[in-house]
Image (cartoon, rainbow, N blue to C red):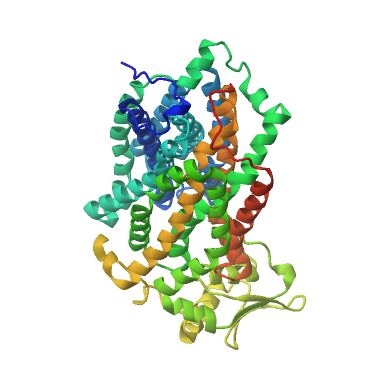
Amino acid sequence: MAVATALPQAGAAARPMTSAEKRVIFASSLGTVFEWYDFFLYGSLAAIIGAQFFSAYPPATRDIFALLAFAAGFIVRPFGALVFGRIGDLVGRKYTFLVTILIMGLSTFIVGILPNAASIGIAAPIILIVLRLAQGLALGGEYGGAATYVAEHAPQGRRGFYTSWIQTTATIGLFLSLIVILVTRTVTGEEAFKEWGWRVPFLVSVLLLGVSVWIRMQLSESPAFQKMKDEGKTSKAPLSEAFGQWGNAKVALIALFGLVAGQGVVWYTGQFYALFFLQSILKVDGYTANLLIAWSLLFGTGFFVVFGWLSDKIGRKVIILAGCAIAAATLFPIFQGITSAANPKLEAAVETVKVTVTADPAQCGNLFNPVGTRVFTAPCDLARDFLSKSSVRYDTASGATGQPTTITVNGTAIPYPQGGAAEANKAALAALQAAGYPKAGDVEIVKMAHPFDVFRAQPAKVIGLLLLLVVLVTMVYGPIAAMLVELFPTRIRYTSMSLPYHIGNGWFGGLLPATAFAMVAQTGDIYYGLWYPIIIAIMTVIIGLIFVPETKDRDIFAET
């Protein structure tokens, strides 16, 4: 039997949650945790999945598959927002996000049983890409539905607190995926995990799917939508009404640039780029890096609810924009502190070893490589790509036209001839290590032998700094669902809030790790990529202060 929930009233702000409201939040949050768990599995296991499905094909074909798989996770999310947002405003919230979870869950389970390229040939990567596209589309519709559904059940004056539970779901989903992967890796062993154990986290998801669908089946439609439907006021054309009328489209643009773009880059920097920075730049082993992030998430997740609750008291706008402003001011010192704690030898080398790439500027291209499949051929690009992947801080100097590329390490010049990259890299690596750059696996790099190694000073310091990033994430993300819901009228709410949210998080945020590392590679500065989230966050603060209204006191039932 469906749970019936009365229409929230303005005077109900001080009362405790009813059991029906708790069930609404639990059902919406659990389903969204599962959706994010599914989504993060692919990102965490991309290298292994790529070896299973793409490695048998020529580089050009492999590159196309890798790019499509990458794009499916982020680029298609706004299209999912349009498709399912429209359905949600036409048909209802409950049934729409029931459909999204079924698509997401079944797609994930099928990945776990999908034969690899060695078994069924090119059909394997094609099916995988289709499943990834389905996941991205479903995720594009899930968040808006869950956030809208919970907000429309919340009493006036408590929407920030109620919807903040939804905001914990992405972090919990990431945390859950990391734990399941770590446990499976430990039980199966690394070799077995690469061969078949990677499928276990995908297969386990079917249990979560079953529980989530069963719980969501018990829910009734949102009271705000049901009231509007009973009065015959539902939108007949949500897309054209939301984005074809300038009054509504302007609000969506303000929400994107004055709220969600900044929130998205702070969120992805604090969780995804932090993990990338630990592994790819600081050379912390994957097991330790995942544990460090997992501990910071465990300690910090409760702040989503704290800031959601606080936004009901002092406002959403002030907390979100403060989070963006603090992030812009502190990202550089926080990441420098992480380097100091996690790999002190690298920090010392970055400060003391002078490395210069000298080449004909015409031979130096851009190093943007979002899926890691570009093949560089010019010596200048090869040299810079090698140095950036080795976490070396370097400068690029313009040489004479036609001048051969050289790498200079503390005054020692190493020729980098056409066709001689392997030998040149070997010589450069020896010179770098002699000058002070740490060797791979250096003992001074932070390393955790087991999960409770957290109590040693070095990992504890790294986790403390990562926790600061998580707190910034909770500031910008905790109140955002309530604010987006309150910005738009009920009749087009699902459609209107979903699109800016998924552009901000899927495009501005989702492309952040690849863009930031391309900036690192292009400039030779391991911290330079942080300018991307800093500039976007500052833009959001400026636009938000000027154009974004405070919404915490709006009655979302007064106007449909």
Q: Is residue 326 left or right of residue 5?
A: right
Left or right: 371, with 36 as reference point: right
* Image x and y of residue 4, in percent: 36, 18
In the rendered view, tell whether residue 378 sits above or below residue 395. above
Whole-percent x, y for residue 434 in the image: 47, 86
Of residue 133 and residue 81, the one placed in the foreground of this image is 81
On-image quarter of the C terminus: top right
Q: Is residue 257 above or below residue 252?
A: below
Can residue 449 be seen in the rendering of this structure?
no
Say which quadrant the N terminus sits in. top left
Q: How many marks?
A: 0
Residue 85 in sight from this viewpoint: yes
Residue reaching furthest left? 187
Q: Toward the viewer: 558 or 400?
A: 558
Residue 466, percent from left and from top: 42, 61
Is residue 59 placed above or below 500 in the rendered structure? below
Residue 138 spot, x, y in % from top left: 48, 32
What residue do we see at 69% from left, 75% from top? 359
539 versus 36 height, above or below: below
Residue at screen point 56% across, 32% down: 554
Relative horizontal placement of residue 245, taking residue 305 as reference (left or right): right
* Occupied quadrant, residue 452: bottom left
Q: Is residue 201 left or right of residue 88?
A: left
Q: Quadrant of residue 325?
A: bottom right
Residue closest to the far right: 401
